[in-house]
Amino acid sequence: MYAAFFTESSLKKGSLSMGLFGNHYERAGSGIAKNAPKKKGIFRFFEIFGRKFWKLFELNLLYFLSFLPVIGAVALFFAVDSQLGTILAAACLVLFAVIIGPATAAHTKILKNFIMEKPTFLAHEFFHTFRTEFKHACIVGVLDCVLACCISAAFYVYPRLIEQTGSKMFYVLFAITLSIGVIALLMNFYIFPMLVSTNLSLKNVLKNSLALSVVALKTNIITILVLAAVIAVYVLVLMFVNIRYSMILLFLLPVMPASWLGLVITFQSYPVIQKYIINPYYEQRGEVNPELAQTVTDEEETVFEDRGGEEKPIEPAKKSGGKSSGGRSHKGKGKIIS
């Protein structure tokens, strides 16, 4: 479809280092094949993570903007010692519940583009998805916030009721509440990637997310273990490390680790959505999922062909007496490429 006459891929790492530190600075490598096989599993994850490392910082900063109402609510609650302060703090929390869903959808859309290796204009894509997915994502965000409040209340209320009454019924209710919380967490692994990738109704998105939380249980457990490990590191550092050093983690929250964790979740969940939701849809229509289709098919006419990985390395011309192999000298004219 196109040709790049001068590309960075035409220089291998090995030949570049030889050019800097050896005497083979004129040697060009064979390039990198356009359709070279992709890495799989954890190796592909870290390849994407390394390539998008600084972009993840920028994305985390954009996503962090949606948490400013929470910071404002805390500041107002403690700084304004009056009923007005409480009302303003509550208003900030309501604002957070409204915008966190669309912000998470936008965050997920960009992470999905990273995983699918699609070019993305970060800020434009973020705010565009925030607007287009606002309705359904807002509903999901509000439901998540309400559920989070209920589970937090359960952690506070049920242990005290058990201690006061000794009734085993409260153990059952507490266990049911925790189970609902875990299921909701697993569903969220799939809700937002499905919202930004399909045209399904919200009802079907929730239904499919519930099914995938059970069908892909092994994948979900791995995802939860990774999230738990990162969160545990944060908590342990804040609890047991000198406050002068542990506070550094709090100051890093605007740039990490939300996008890192989001990348783990999307990397794990989106292939499951492709396998069970997207691919079957195209198979029923006798079509191929465009995300899996080849960029250039056999039927397409190509003007230029990418020969990366097939070209023969170009050896430098042997020099003697300060002259090139052609016996000509080009003083002051620099290197001539013929």
Image (tube, helix red, strand yellow):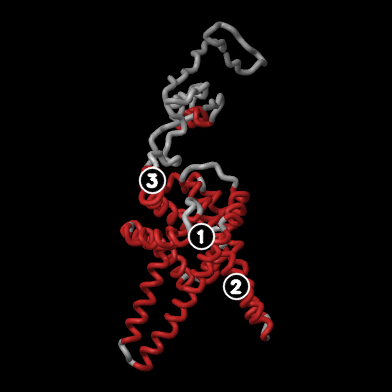
Q: Please say if 309 is above or below 282.
A: above
Left or right: where does residue 333 sit relative to residue 233?
right
Q: Distance between the residues labelled 1 and 3?
A: 29 Å
Which residue is disc 3 drawn over?
279
C-beta proximity under 8 Å, tags 1 and 3: no
- Looking at the image, which residue is at 38% across and 35% down? 37
Label 2 environment density (alpha carbons within 10 Å; few <14, some 14–19, many ≥20) = some
Quarter location, residue 329:
top right
Give the x, y percent position of residue 75.
64, 75
Q: Which amino acid does label 1 sit on?
A: Ala
- Looking at the image, which residue is at 55% across and 49% down? 54
Which residue is disc 1 drawn over?
258
Which residue is disc 2 drawn over?
94
Q: Which one is closest to the eye, mark 2 or mark 1?
A: 2
Q: Which amino acid does label 3 sit on?
A: Asn
Q: Which one is closest to the eye, mark 2 or mark 3?
A: 3
In the picture as drawn, the residue positioned furthest to the top comes out as 327
Give the x, y percent position of residue 184.
42, 67
